[in-house]
């Protein structure tokens, strides 16, 4: 959708132009870029716009299956932080079933990295600025590698849902993830597939709905039932933001392109703008 100068909202285009072979000139909507017969991204759950840097203006959407990159009216779909469920067959072979998860958690890191958090896994992608490269999955190698892809072994087995709903990363390199059922966690990466996760027990809610990291090192935490909270630059001090009304935080959008920077906070009682 596009917002006009007078505030009206109009449909610019139902996206269908793919960076790859998907559909040719057929206006099919978003299909798999490498093969338009696969229609896997049916529900958009999250959306993030790159606010600055080399890829400013790019849009990422999290769907029921993966993460899609949109540049102007052309897309590349998709990448997913996924794993394979292996089931033995009677003949001794093993079947593999891709477990992709719903991508509710989506963010842009301080260096333009794409932060992904779905029902099972947390991932960090390193885009190279080339739209056509985004879906070329070679895991740790290739043009757009995962610099991290793993699960919270301190919380659950890989097969169990962690229900991640939000993710953010500070300039200092601290990564925060929020769960629908298991609260707020700080992730300290140890290698490309493992990390130490520490739960923030001081947060009086197990249901985190949104996260935003500011240039000043502050992390804002939106909850389903306890309003908006703030973690100071020390990564430990946690306080409730009393100036924001509402117990249910629906969305956080940080805009560093203005001075002072703005944080849009959408709650069940309306929209509040905080200035840094």
Image: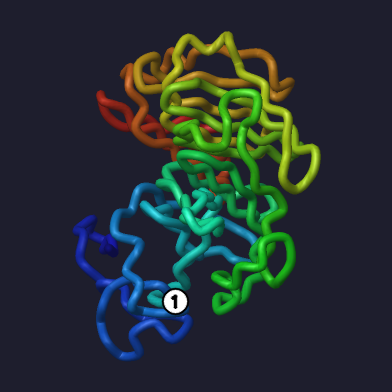
Is residue 39 something that shows in the picture?
yes
Left/right of residue 109 with respect to residue 243 in the rendered view: right
Residue 47 picture location, percent across and down: 41, 52
Q: Secondary structure at mark 1?
A: loop
Picture layout, residue 250 above or below residue 35? above
Q: Quadrant of residue 42?
A: bottom left
Is residue 50 something that shows in the picture?
no
Residue 213 picture location, percent across and down: 59, 36
Residue 5 picture location, percent across and down: 28, 62
Q: Quadrant of residue 17?
A: bottom left
User: Residue farthest to the bottom?
Assistant: 25
Q: Nearer the viewer, residue 184 or 96?
A: 96
Q: How is the image coloured?
A: rainbow
What is the quadrant of the N terminus in the image? bottom left
Which residue is painted at 70% across and 24% down in the image? 233
Picture layout, residue 144 above or below residue 202? below
Which residue is painted at 45% across and 14% down in the image? 205
Q: Is disc 1 surrounded by few (<14), some (14 to 19) or many (20+) residues within 10 Å?
A: many
Picture layout, residue 87 above or below residue 158? below
Residue 59 picture location, percent across and down: 46, 61
User: Residue farthest to the front?
Assistant: 91
Left/right of residue 44 with respect to residue 237 in the rendered view: left
Picture layout, residue 75 above or below residue 110? below
Residue assigned mark 1:
33
What is the quadrant of the C terminus in the image? top right
């Amino acid at each position: 959708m596009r917002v006009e100068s007078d505030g009206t909202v109009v449909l610019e285009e139902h996206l269908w132009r793919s960076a790859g072979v998907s559909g040719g000139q057929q206006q099919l909507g978003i299909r798999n870029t490498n093969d338009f017969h696969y229609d896997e991204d049916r529900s958009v759950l999250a959306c993030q716009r790159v606010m600055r840097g080399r890829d400013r203006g790019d849009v990422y959407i999290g769907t029921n299956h993966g993460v899609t990159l949109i540049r102007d009216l052309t897309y590349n779909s998709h990448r997913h932080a996924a794993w394979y469920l292996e089931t033995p067959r009677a003949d001794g072979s093993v079947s593999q079933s891709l477990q992709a998860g719903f991508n509710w958690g989506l963010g842009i890191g301080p260096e333009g990295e794409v932060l992904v958090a779905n029902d099972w896994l947390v991932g960090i992608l390193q885009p190279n600025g080339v739209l056509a490269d985004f879906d070329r999955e070679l895991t740790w190698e290739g043009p757009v590698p995962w610099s991290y892809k793993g699960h919270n072994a301190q919380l659950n087995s890989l097969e169990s849902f962690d229900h991640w709903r939000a993710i953010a990363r500070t300039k200092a390199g601290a990564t925060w993830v929020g769960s629908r059922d298991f609260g707020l966690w700080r992730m300290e990466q140890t290698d490309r597939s493992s990390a130490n996760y520490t739960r923030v027990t001081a947060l009086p809610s197990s249901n985190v709905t949104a996260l935003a990291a500011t240039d000043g090192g502050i992390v804002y935490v939106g909850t389903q039932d306890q309003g908006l909270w703030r973690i100071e630059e020390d990564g430990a001090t946690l306080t409730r933001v009393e100036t924001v009304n509402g117990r249910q935080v629906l969305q956080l959008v940080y805009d560093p392109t203005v001075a002072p920077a703005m944080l849009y906070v959408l709650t069940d009682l309306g929209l509040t703008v905080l200035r840094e």
